[in-house]
């Protein structure tokens, strides 16, 4: 069926129109010329359904409507396109477990214990990002499809940037490393994310004469720039072995590198002690440089200048560092090793005249301790809500975002979690993860869950039961009724009466249960037997939902009693169904016909009083019909009435004789 689209207000009706049709998680957009076809977009145009919610333009196909060329092109605008990438499923699934664990963790933990717990949670998130990145890298290597290779490579770059940002936020915000350990953490951060040196090191060390390799001094410089002194000294020892003339210079430089004061993670020395040691060491380096000790070897002289924190000497190695944040950490290492967190505000080296890239902007905001700016820039730059939702939640648990409420009522954590979970609900299976995220949004989570869960396509009964269980666990009574009604209607359309009745009972829908009960009774009249006996036999208290359902259950009980030859009980139940007006009048003839075999039994079943009641019911049934209806009754119906009258009269005679005999004796 065609779905009418809407036209952008203010558009010229005589020109091309921009039409759109909304859905739960996507929007279908089409530029078309209004003509005889008008502004209609059909579900068949795109080959699939469409869903609402803002996002990036992710795909388009040529229009196939009868309007010909004027149909233009059709676009599907979908948010959170990343949730449809199969290789990212690990990221969503495993981070969900970490998220739930964080919400359930012991809030009572305080001080160092709580901080250690939050740092571990942060590392767990990073390990998931890295594992996903490695999987994506392997997929890029193994695929032969150029388009897929490009897609996977792009995702590897995005995941790498995400881990880079997250790691920095972990150091500055979650761990909140103090002066001294802060620099060590930043050095580890640089070493982890600037990996270009590894291939170069392997190439140099695998050569026959490493000290003669053209990249030898580049590798030594990189080790020094990253504070990897032991590795730099190891390489320099090869140079000393190969060039005896440089042994003295090597020993002095090696001694300087060995004695370089390094901040301690164990806090075994105070900052004052560290600064004094560093000042003495710095003066010693300065003395050797001024004495011209390394004048005959430009490479060693350059290294000595780097040790002194000479900015020009460090900038000369700009090509080896590749990034401004590598330069920043190196400069701090050799000029201000006891830097405090709030002293990280700096004049940035961006390595070019062009403006900063989005990644640079995010990292700069982090170094400036602008948490909200980091979250804002990540929301703009990254292709999904996963990163900002989980990072903000973690920062919120660190008590860093409590003061920041959004103008429309929700705090930043909840807003981003709602956005992320809403995206998950557009996926055919990831929606189950979204439920837990909504559960942990105290202000609007319940409302969002109610709205989104109603839009889940109930393709199978198994999926419907899963959705139903979620709603029942959360006392979402309106949604429970809605799901049950939908499934009952589907089952009824497929003539699965037992399933339809079961769903209507769960929905506590008396009207629908009555309708299905009537269908059961109609089928019985046509076929002479009941379907779904197990369900009807075990209705229990559920049969009280409606009068018709009660009658169905009791009528089935009558057949069971008759089958077990418990005729007296069956007769009482049959009479009760009629005299208590539980049975619909349209079914009285069937009940009276069911009484015939009991009336013809050798043993008298119905008493005189019961027989009179049956006679009255028969007369009420026939008396209620007009003369016209009586003329329309077929011969079979007329014969039934006559047979019933004869059987009732005969039974009455037998009862009177029996009761008179008993009285006479």
Image (spheres, rainbow, N blue to C red):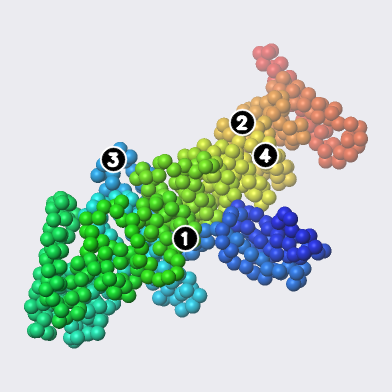
Q: Secondary structure at mark 4?
A: helix
Asked whether the beta carbons under mark 4 and mark 2 sit within 8 Å of each other, the answer is no
Return the mark for residue 329: none
Q: Residues within 10 Å of mark 4 (few under 14, many from 20)?
A: many
Q: CA distance from mark 3 to mark 1?
A: 33 Å
Mark 1 and mark 4 lie on one chain; the one further toward the N terminus is 1
Residue that carries the numbered disc 1 in the rendered image: 382
Instruction: Write down the residue under mark 4.
Output: 512
Please provide percent x and percent y for residue 66.
Answer: 77, 68
Tag in front: 3 or 2: 3
Query: Does residue 504 appear to the left or right of 377 in the view shown?
Result: right
Is label 3 in a helix, a strand or a loop?
Answer: loop
Write down the residue under mark 3: 109
What is the C-alpha distance between the residues marked 3 and 2? 53 Å
The quadrant holding residue 73 is bottom right
With respect to residue 592, does 35 lie above or below? below
């Amino acid at each position: 069926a065609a779905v009418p689209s809407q036209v952008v207000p203010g558009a010229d009706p005589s020109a091309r129109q921009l039409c759109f049709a909304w859905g739960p998680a996507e929007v279908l957009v089409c530029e078309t010329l209004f003509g005889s076809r008008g502004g209609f977009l059909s579900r068949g145009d795109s080959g699939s359904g469409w869903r609402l919610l803002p996002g990036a333009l992710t795909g388009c196909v040529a229009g196939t409507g009868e309007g010909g060329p004027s149909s233009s092109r059709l676009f599907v605008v979908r948010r959170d396109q990343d949730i449809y990438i199969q290789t990212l499923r690990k990221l969503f699934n495993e981070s969900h477990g970490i998220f739930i664990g964080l919400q359930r963790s012991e809030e009572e933990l305080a001080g160092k214990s709580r901080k250690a717990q939050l740092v571990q949670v942060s590392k767990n998130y990073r390990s998931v990002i890295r594992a996903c990145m490695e999987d994506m890298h392997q997929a890029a290597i193994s695929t032969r499809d150029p388009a897929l290779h490009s897609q996977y490579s792009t995702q590897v770059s995005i995941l790498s940037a995400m881990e880079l940002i997250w790691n920095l936020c972990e150091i500055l915000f979650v761990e909140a490393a103090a002066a001294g350990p802060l620099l060590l953490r930043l050095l580890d951060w640089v070493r982890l994310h600037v990996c270009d040196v590894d291939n170069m090191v392997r190439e140099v060390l695998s050569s026959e004469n490493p000290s003669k390799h053209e990249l030898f001094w580049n590798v030594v410089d990189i080790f020094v720039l990253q504070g990897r002194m032991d590795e730099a000294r190891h390489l320099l020892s090869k140079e000393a072995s190969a060039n005896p003339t440089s042994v003295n210079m090597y020993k002095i430089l090696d001694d300087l590198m060995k004695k370089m004061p390094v901040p301690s993670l164990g806090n075994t020395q105070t900052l004052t002690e560290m600064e004094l040691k560093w000042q003495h060491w710095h003066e010693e380096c300065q003395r050797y440089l001024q004495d011209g000790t390394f004048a005959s070897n430009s490479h060693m002289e350059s290294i000595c200048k780097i040790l002194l924190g000479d900015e020009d000497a460090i900038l000369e190695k700009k090509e080896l560092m590749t990034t401004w944040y590598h330069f920043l950490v190196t400069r701090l290492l050799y000029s201000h090793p006891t830097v405090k967190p709030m002293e990280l505000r700096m004049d940035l080296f961006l390595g070019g005249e062009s403006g900063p890239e989005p990644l640079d902007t995010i990292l700069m905001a982090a170094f400036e301790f602008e948490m909200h700016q980091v979250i804002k820039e990540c929301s703009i730059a990254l292709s999904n809500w996963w990163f900002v939702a989980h990072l903000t939640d973690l920062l919120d648990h660190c008590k860093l975002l409590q003061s920041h409420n959004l103008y429309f009522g929700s705090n930043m954590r909840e807003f981003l979690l709602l956005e992320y979970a809403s995206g998950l609900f557009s996926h055919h299976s990831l929606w189950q993860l979204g439920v837990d995220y909504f559960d942990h949004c105290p202000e609007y989570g319940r409302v969002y869950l109610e709205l989104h869960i109603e839009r889940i396509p109930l393709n199978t009964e198994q999926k419907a039961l899963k959705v139903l269980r979620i709603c029942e666990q959360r006392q979402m009574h309106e949604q429970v009724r809605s799901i049950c009604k939908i499934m009952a209607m589907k089952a009824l359309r497929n003539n699965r009466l037992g399933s339809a009745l079961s769903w209507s009972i769960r929905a506590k829908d008396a009207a629908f249960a009555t309708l299905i009960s009537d269908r059961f009774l109609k089928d019985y009249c046509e076929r002479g037997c009941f379907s779904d006996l197990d369900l009807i036999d075990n209705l229990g208290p559920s049969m009280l939902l409606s009068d018709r359902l009660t009658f169905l259950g009791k009528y089935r009980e009558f057949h069971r009693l008759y089958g077990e030859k418990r005729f007296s009980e069956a007769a009482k139940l049959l009479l009760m169904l009629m005299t208590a007006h539980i049975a619909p009048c349209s079914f009285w003839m069937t009940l009276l016909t069911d009484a015939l075999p009991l009336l013809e039994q050798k043993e008298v079943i119905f008493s005189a009083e019961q027989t009179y009641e049956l006679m009255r019911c028969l007369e009420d049934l026939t008396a209620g019909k007009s003369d016209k209806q009586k003329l329309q009754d077929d011969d079979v119906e007329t014969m039934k009435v006559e047979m019933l009258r004869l059987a009732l009269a005969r039974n009455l005679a037998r009862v009177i004789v029996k009761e008179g005999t008993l009285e006479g004796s």
